[in-house]
Amino acid sequence: MRVDKLATIDNGVRVAPSRIPEAGNGLFAAATFSRNSYITLYDGETLTAKEAWSRPLLTHMAGREGVVVDGIKRPISGRGGGSFANASRLSRDANAEIVAWLGLLVLRAKRTILDGEEIFVHYGRRGFALAMPTPHA
């Protein structure tokens, strides 16, 4: 895999309102990605775990194998769009996964993802609870 060959916002992936009610933006394929292909960079600021937990806002943040990234929070054309992939409640419902690769986080397709399809990842139970809006009483 070459980082310069990954999809970026407006070139292979796009950010648009999610199909999940109240979820805000989501990440959508703007091309077809085959199973096990790398999709896009989880772009943002790389942090230590201690730095990450000291942040007041934990949304758009992901960590794998010691790599923690505070992802970009507004879409920027030409940047990796991984931080806009919304969470699936269960791992089996995710069509992509976040993987560590040479000190970076990258989204990889778990199955074929068709052009126009929303991309979902599983952040884990704790990550899902942190990322999802609190139900209104």
Image: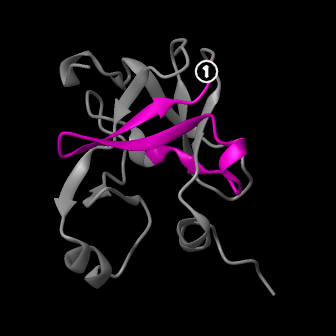
Does 92 lie within the magenta span? yes
Residue at figure coordinates x 45%, y 31% from the top left: 108
Q: Nearer the viewer, residue 15 or 94?
A: 94
Does 17 lie within the magenta span? no
Query: Magenta region: which residues?
Result: 84-113
Q: Quadrant of residue 105?
A: top left
* Image coords of residue 85 (percent x, y): 51, 44
Per the image, the residue denoted by label 1 is: 113
Q: Nearer the viewer, residue 97 or 53?
A: 97
Instruction: Look at the image and tell me in which quarter the C terminus lies.
Output: bottom right
Is 93 situated above or below 38? Answer: below
In the image, taking residue 90 as reference, residue 12 lies left or right, namely left
In the image, taking residue 33 as reference, residue 66 lies left or right, namely left
In the image, taking residue 81 as reference, residue 94 lies left or right, namely right
- In the rendered structure, which amino acid carries the disc numbered 1? Ile
* Image coords of residue 34 (percent x, y): 54, 14
Residue at figure coordinates x 38%, y 42% from the top left: 99
Is 92 situated above or below 108? Answer: below
Instruction: Look at the image and tell me in which quarter the N terminus lies.
Output: top left
Residue at figure coordinates x 18%, y 69% from the top left: 48
Furthest residue in direction front, as rendered: 65
Q: Residues within 10 Å of mark 1 (few under 14, many from 20)?
A: many
Q: Nearer the viewer, residue 78 or 43?
A: 43
* Image coords of residue 110 (percent x, y): 57, 30
